[in-house]
Amino acid sequence: MNKKLWFLLVLLLSLVLALGACSSSSGDGDDKGKDDGKTEDTNKGDDGEAADGEPQEGGTLVYALDSAPDGVFNINFYGTATDAEVIGFFDDGLIKYDDELKPVPNIAEWETDDNKVFTFKFKEGVKWHNGEELTVDDWVFALETIAHPDYDASRYANVKNIEGAEAFHEGEADSISGLKVVNDYEIEITFDKARVNNLENLWTYPMSRKEFEGVEVADMSESEQVRTNPVGTGPFKVTKIVPGESIQFEAFEDYWQGKPHIDSIVLKVIDPSLVVEELRGGTLDMTAFHPSNYEEINALDNAEVLRAPGLSYYYVGFRLGSYDGKKATMDYEKYQNQDLRLAMAHAIDREAWIDEYFYGLGESLNRVVPSAHWIAADDADLENHFEFDPELAKQILEDAGYVDTDDDGFREDPDGNKFVVKFSHYATDNPDFEARAKALTQYWNDVGLETELEMTDSGLYYPLLEEGDDSMEVFFGGWSTGADPDPTALWQSDMVWNFPRWVDEENDQLMEDALDIEIVGTDQDKRKELYVEWQQNINEFIPMIPVAELEEVLAISSRLQNVTMDVSGTNSPHEWWIQQ
Amino acid sequence: MLKYSLRRILGMIPMLILISIVVFTLAKLMPGDALSGEIDPTNTNPEYIENMREKLGYNDPYYKQYIRWITDFAQGDFGKSVRYKTKVSSIIAEKLPNTIFLGVASLVITYILAFIMGIYAGRKPYTLGDHAIGGFNYFGLAIPSFVAGVFAIYLFSFKLGWFPSNGSVDIMVQEGTLEYWLSRIHHVILPALVLGMLSTASYTQFLRNDIIENSRKDFVRTAKAKGTSQSKIYNVHILRNSIIPLVTFLGFDIVSIIGGAVITETIFTYPGIGQLFLTSVQARDYSVLMAITMMFSCLVLVGNLVADILYGIVDPRIRLE
């Protein structure tokens, strides 16, 4: 027994030593890698410039995902932004968007005379990663999958306007009648009626019919074609997936825009709190990051930050009415006074607030459309600019009858009743949220409006807003906009996401007109005019105070070259290259 | 023993039913559901969300939802995850091996460290070495694992570069090769160390105290009087007696490792059950959440049972009837 025990101990000990040795040896390897990186950096000044214009082939790019992907790697099925990030590397859309978010041809170009019937022409010779050629039939397949009754993701809204899609969805037809295949590279799509935004709303991503042969629509989202072995038409193809942690890509030789310069890409889930150190250590080439890390990353000498205008904005909304699930009524009196809302806007020092909580990576805005969008109204056309002016705010409140009658330091409402602003902000484990919400309440306290802050759990926050719950009076929120400027889903009076429950005929009419082909035709300028009017209307009425729009940021290591970013995202990864 | 085990296992059934009611109620009491986090006008629309809620039965009365869930669950159908859009069982099957690997690695490290330190400290009590080990252990007991994890990453990954800071394996190595397993071991050491820290500390102190206590017993004096060598007394006579109570800890360890994994895996972005649990709570992914909680509960019950049975095996004086 004695010997046996000793043998066991020795065995365990030797295992420990062996493991220790293996770890320290790879540690050496890492260190060497770092040293190499440094010498390269110093060399760059000498021969780097000459090499700049000339892309170099090869290398592996390491990209950080900030949370684990769900594993739904097909653009027709995915649900989360992280999955979309992964899909972006291996799949291409038929059309893309320019830096004003107007659609431009990518794989397909289109023609239309009346915005009802569209003819799409595909490029020839575009290959799927499985070797098949992309034809219009693959697009028909995607559209029919999405319209199928068993389809279990959220894209049906992008298909249902096609003629006959409804019947197919209900199971009354075997195919969608509005899809007419002319030949392998040409298809005619007829919508149920002419709309201004038919194209922007249309689902323009194909899906390989060959690859999904024999898979029922109901089983697709859990099939291996989606989860472990996805194919696309993009510049890189998936070679290996370690679920929930990393994905490996290699260059797709037959990519239709040309073979990528980089040999392989590794996507790794790295906690956002670690990315700065990973960048510093040279083990990471590309990552999104939290604004609070901006200065630290900017100071690194082996990384740089790309910035582009973003598509999301934050606002402070006012509860003006109630909602019964179908119809909104503007019957909540407390914030009905327009001057009150204007004064509250003037009380906020938005620039200082953005610098403090978004580290300079944002800007204040006066409309509910991000500046980069082509429908964004010029500030000169807007009446209110919500400058920080506490004296003006106090004056407006004085004039509107909000005065301090009982000398407690806070204003009462015009009838002399106690007036307390109830402000809500969502709460997660991010400590910034409470701090920035407190800062806003302080601004209002400073002009004599007593404000109470309530931090509501993020899971509860939006459901409460959807129900139009009494507890949500003045609320902080954020929206992001897509390529299609149509704001109906967020602003039409009876929509569930019209959180202020603002009912305004002019507002509804303007949104309707901007979609009406009879009024707008195919003239984009006319459409923009209507949207500018719509923005002016909101700016005047102030159902919400637009607070900030955020920039999109991306950190890249300095060995990575030719990466550009605009409002629609980065350039195609096949153009990137790595300085060897 | 068999009778006892059977009785205990039968006794678990009402317990599990009660647990399932509590788990279900707590899950449903959480504000929001898996779809409320998806409000994004560019990617979804209210109609779809409403349809999905109807399809998933979120609008049915709670008792109906419970009965539907528990009937499926009893038949081994854990349901489908809203977030992952696939069967809960396959998601869990994907992550479970990682957690088991982490748990086993942590146990192995715990045992090795605790034995070495405990035996040393027990043989030479009240010396400098013993105090150093004692101090180290109280440190280990006092530092919460989320603090220890962050420090371990900072020190061993970023400053020294010995271990990777995230993941369970390097994607570049070929699966099945020796290199692959070395890479997995390399990735698991740091989280396993942090995960096992608490139990290492308590094991060591326990072993040390037990050895000291045993060394004062009559049978040790007798052995000494017989002229048995010092090392044989410690390694055979005392150690065997001191291990007995330790063995019973195994059952509780299973429980504490699973619980600790929730935090450790999240810090080290190690894709296991613990991390899955946390993200499911955040995403309100009920089916995954409830399946994992039920699994944890079963493990706690089984762990306790294992502990009790081990008592009977290592110490025949204890009768399990």
Image (cartoon, coloured by chain):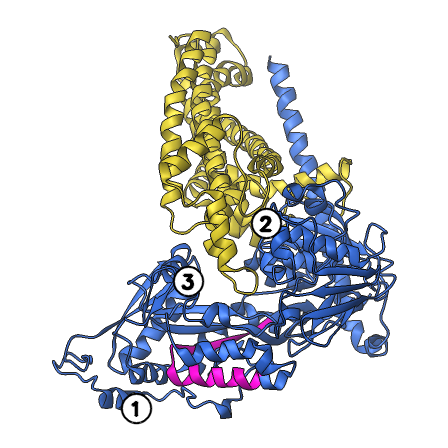
Chain colours: A blue, B yellow
Image height of A441 relative to A384, above or below: above
Image height of B104 relative to B172, above or below: above
Image height of A519 relative to A65, above or below: below
Q: Are marks 3 and 2 on the same chain?
A: yes
Within 10 Å of disc 1 (Cα), the crowding (few <14, some 14-19, many 20+) is: few
Q: Is residue A278 magenta?
A: no
Precedes in sequence: disc 1 or disc 2: 2
For the magenta stretch, what is the residue range?
A: A527-552
Q: CA distance from mark 1 to mark 2?
A: 61 Å
Horizontal and vertical percent position of residue A415 = 15, 80
Read off the chain for label 3: A
Within 10 Å of disc 2 (Cα), the crowding (few <14, some 14-19, many 20+) is: few
Horizontal and vertical percent position of residue B130 = 46, 34
Residue occupied by mark 2: A170
Image height of A475 relative to B141, above or below: below
Q: Residue at x 37, y 33 (%)?
A: B21
Q: CA distance from mark 1 to mark 3?
A: 31 Å
Quadrant of residue A112 within the rendered picture = bottom right
Read off the chain for label 1: A
Read off the chain for label 2: A
Residue occupied by mark 3: A431
Q: Nearer the viewer, residue B56 or A562?
A: B56
Q: Quick check: can you spot residue A577?
A: no
